[in-house]
Image (cartoon, helix red, strand yellow):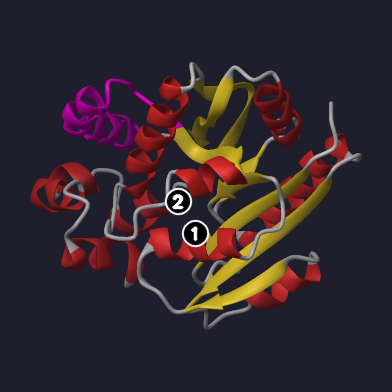
Amino acid sequence: MSNHTFSIIIPAHNEEQYIGACLEAIQLAKAEVSDSHVEVIVVANRCTDKTAEIAKSFGAKVIDNQDKCISMIRNAGVRAAEGDIIVTIDADSCMTKGSLKEIAEMLECGKYVGGGTRSKFDRISIGMLFSGAYVAVNLFPIMVKNKAALSGGMFWCYKTDFEKIGGFDETLISLEDMDFAARLNKLGVSRGQKFGTLKKSYILTSSRKFDEFGDWYLIKNRKLTKRIFTGKDREAADGFYYDVR
C-alpha cells in the first residue's frame, strides 16, 4: 500500500456525548495505515458544549463554523484539508478498524472513483425497521433517477475528485449525501470506474434521532418526512436537524 495523507472531516454540533468514541475509533483505524499521515478535522458548528475541547484533546484540528447547512459545514472542513484522500464521517458514527486500510486499497486499485460504506445502528426496533422501509420507498424515485442505489454513511475519495465535482451542493438543505454520491458516481462512470462500498468495513451509528423523536416518528409525521426529502425545505430541516437541541 502506497503512502497517503488522509483528511477525515467530522461535522459536529454539540457532540460532546459522541465525538470521543468517533475519534477513538479513528485512532484504531489509523494504526493500520501507520505509513500514512492522518489528519482529523472537526468542524465545530455553533457548539456551546465541550465538543471542541474534546476534539483538541485527541489532537484534531478544530474549525469554528456558524453555518446551518451540512454541505457548507463539510465543505469548510475539506477546504482546510491537506490530505490527498478525503473521508467524511458524522460525529455520532464510529468507523471499524479496517476502514482506512480498505479505503486506500480500493482507491489504489483504480477500479473505484470513491464511495461509501454500510451503516449499522447501535440498536434496532420494529419501529426503526418500518421507518427504514418507509424511507427507502420514498427515496426509490431518487435512486431510479440516479440509476443506482449508492451507499453513504462515510464518503471517501481523492481530494482532487472531490474538488472536480464541486464538493457537497450548498444549495441543498438535506439529501446532500445522495446528491454527492450521484455526482461522484457520474464522474466514475465517465472514467470507467465504479462507486464503491467498503466490503469488510462499516460504521456503527447512533440511533439518537429515534431516541429523540421516537422509533415511529418518520411514519407518524409523513408530511414532514416528505418535506425533508425535497432537499430544499429549510423549516423542515431546521426542525429535524439544526434546531433540535
On screen, residue 61 above or below 166: below
In the image, is 111 to the left or to the right of 59?
Answer: left
The residue to which callout 1 is attached is 74
Mark 1 or 2, closer to the camera: 2
What residue sits 28% from the left and 59% below the top? Answer: 173
Give the image location of residue 58, x and y in percent: 79, 64
Residue shown at 73% from the left, 24% from the top: 105
Determine the image quadrant of residue 79: bottom right
Callout 1: few (<14), some (14-19), or many (20+) C-alpha neighbours within 10 Å?
many
Q: CA distance from mark 1 to mark 2?
A: 9 Å
Residue, disc 2: 167
Quarter of the picture holding the N terminus: top right
Magenta region: 125-151
Q: Which mark is residue 203?
A: none
- Verify whether residue 10 appears in magenta: no
Q: Amino acid at mark 1?
A: Arg
Q: Residue at x 72, y 51 (%)?
A: 83
- Sequence-earlier tag: 1 or 2: 1
Mark 2 lies on a secondary structure that is loop
Q: Please name the predominant secondary structure of the magenta segment in the image.
A: helix
Disc 2 residue type (three-letter) = Gly
**Vertical placement of residue 29 versus 59, above or below:** above
Is the Cβ of the residue at disc 1 closer than 8 Å to that at disc 2? Answer: yes
Residue 88: x, y in percent? 56, 48
